[in-house]
Image (tube, helix red, strand yellow):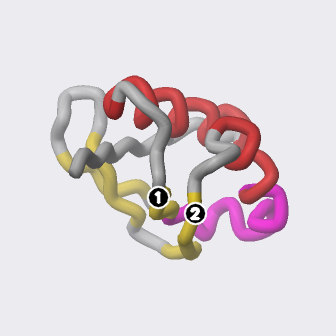
Amino acid sequence: MRWSNSISTRPSLEAAVKEVAEKSLESLGTTADLGLVFISSAFASEYPRLMPLLKEYLPETIIIGCGGGGIVGMNEEGKPQEVE
């Protein structure tokens, strides 16, 4: 089993989704079967837009997720980073 982790600090939801989807797919080298997505509460007003944007990049992927504060992921240097 392979897995990938990425995080974005982009201020726009579109740019953040594009960045994490592209990074994850590049890291995996193939499509993902399952996506676990955690979205910052800073995007709370945009939650309804998340799934359609994700499905543009990951059309066959089963996606499970939630919103939260203190989202953690791996930064460009491969070190854990907390956002918010």
The residue depicted at 17 percent of the width and 41 percent of the height is 79
Residue 8 in picture, x, y percent from top left:
48, 40
Secondary element at tag 2:
strand
Q: Chief secondary structure of the magenta span?
A: helix
Quarter of the rendering containing residue 44: bottom right
First in sequence: mark 1 vs mark 2: 1
Residue 48 in picture, x, y percent from top left:
82, 66
The residue depicted at 74 percent of the width and 58 percent of the height is 51
Closer to us: 23 or 31: 31
Report which residue position mark 1 lands on: 34
What is the CA distance from the residue labelled 1 to the residue labelled 2? 6 Å
- Asked if 66 appears above or below 11 in the picture, the reply is below
The residue depicted at 47 percent of the width and 73 percent of the height is 69
Q: Is residue 41 magenta?
A: yes
The residue depicted at 46 percent of the width and 63 percent of the height is 36
Q: Which residues are magenta?
A: 38-50
Residue 34 in picture, x, y percent from top left:
47, 58
Q: Are marks 1 and 2 in contact (CB under 8 Å)?
A: yes
Report which residue position mark 2 lands on: 63
Type of residue at label 1?
Leu
Closer to us: 58 or 1: 1
Quarter of the rendering containing residue 17: top right
- Asked if 74 appears above or below 49 in the picture, the reply is above
Residue 16 in picture, x, y percent from top left:
60, 39
Secondary element at tag 1:
strand
Left or right of 70, for residue 4: left
Quarter of the figure that contains the C terminus: bottom left
Quarter of the rendering containing residue 27: top left
Type of residue at label 2?
Ile
